[in-house]
């Protein structure tokens, strides 16, 4: 099986690094309009760098790690040369399969939305695809993506929501970790130690949600002792519209994803 990727930036690079750790790098090709970035990726992973986008079209599974605004230019170059046997996997935010097919009518697409946590093999990735993707092809694509973390199939109507929650979500979590650390420093903790405490707290809390199966509110209640320190902090967050701020952030990201697809 041959795997190719057009684009080796933050997201494409993260996915392909995970893929290169599991699959034969001799069968993996990458290209990038920034040739130096692409060559550096190839040197790091052992994958083969090729100069032109069309040079990856002999692969069985081809990732499009291209920003939405550049997809038209890429398809202008490759659309007429995509073989019917290839499965094209697009990670462009907001761009629906229908629009991808308008650019390349003979191509067959899987649409995906990963997140940057693929860099450590902990991505949350959603995939969706049409009827022209065979079940075994979908299964193989999911297996490839599973090298970078958890994968779930969703209906395409949820992809903008996925983009906002798991695609953009890490940035919101990083901001929360930074804020926790700033608060720790304010209370007297050294900066380097503050980041460790904040990050491990978020990591462990997420693990409890996933492993326990309990509602986050129930886990929150476990920590809130009567007249204790935690409930005071919770009250302060509520006073400052913490949950509403998160909801508004995700909604804004979702709206932007919808706009990018138009």
Image: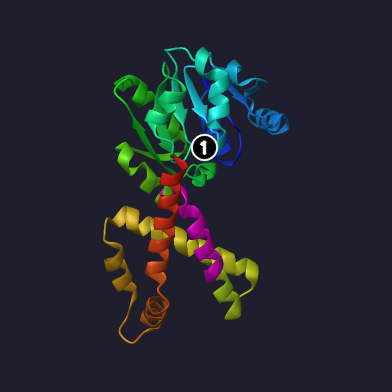
User: Does residue 28 appear left or right of residue 154 in this picture?
Assistant: right
Q: Is residue 58 above or below residue 259?
A: above
**Residue appearing at x 48%, y 44% in the figure:** 115
Can residue 209 be seen in this snapshot? yes
Q: Could you tell me which quadrant the C terminus lies in?
A: top left
Q: Residue at x 40, y 51 (%)?
A: 254
Front residue (pair 166, 181): 166
* Nearer to us in this view, 53 or 180: 53
Q: Tell whether position 169 is magenta.
A: yes
Q: Position of residue 255 (x, y in %)?
A: 41, 51
> Relative to residue 228, is residue 99 depicted above or below?
above
The secondary element bearing badge 1 is classed as: helix
Residue 226, quarter of the rendered image: bottom left
Residue 209 image point, x, y percent: 33, 58
Q: Is residue 60 above or below residue 187?
A: above
Q: Label 1 belongs to which residue?
A: 68
Left or right: where does residue 252 sit relative to residue 28?
Answer: left
Considering the whole magenta stretch, tell me its main secondary structure. Answer: helix
Mark 1 closeness class: few <14, some 14–19, many ≥20 residues within 10 Å: some
Q: Can residue 67 be seen by looking at this rendering?
A: no
- Is 170 displayed left or right of 137 in the figure? right
Identify which residue is drawn at 55% across, 37% down: 69
Query: In the image, is 226 to the left or to the right of 100?
Result: left
Q: Which residues are magenta?
A: 166-180
């Amino acid at each position: 099986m041959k795997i190719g990727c057009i684009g080796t930036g933050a997201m494409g690079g993260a996915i392909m690094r995970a893929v290169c750790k599991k699959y034969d790098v001799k069968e993996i090709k990458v290209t990038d309009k920034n040739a130096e970035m692409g060559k550096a990726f190839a040197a790091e992973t052992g994958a083969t760098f090729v100069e032109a986008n069309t040079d990856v079209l002999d692969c069985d599974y081809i990732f499009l790690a291209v920003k939405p605004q550049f997809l038209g230019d890429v398809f202008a170059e490759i659309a007429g040369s995509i073989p019917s046997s290839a499965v094209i996997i697009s990670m462009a935010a907001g761009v629906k399969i229908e629009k991808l097919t308008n650019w390349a009518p003979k191509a067959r697409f899987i649409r995906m939305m990963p997140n940057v946590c693929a860099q450590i093999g902990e991505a949350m990735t959603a995939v969706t695809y049409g009827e022209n993707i065979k079940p075994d092809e979908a299964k193989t694509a999911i297996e490839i993506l599973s090298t970078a973390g958890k994968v779930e199939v969703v209906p395409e109507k949820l992809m903008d929501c996925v983009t906002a929650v798991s695609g953009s979500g890490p940035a919101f979590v990083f901001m929360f970790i930074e804020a926790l650390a700033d608060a720790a420093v304010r209370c007297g903790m050294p900066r380097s130690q503050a980041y460790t405490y904040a990050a491990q707290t978020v990591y462990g809390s997420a693990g409890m949600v996933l492993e326990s199966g309990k509602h986050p509110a129930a886990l929150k209640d476990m920590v809130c002792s009567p007249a204790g320190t935690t409930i005071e902090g919770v009250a302060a967050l509520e006073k400052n519209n913490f949950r509403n701020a998160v909801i508004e952030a995700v909604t804004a990201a979702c709206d932007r994803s919808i706009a990018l697809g138009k």
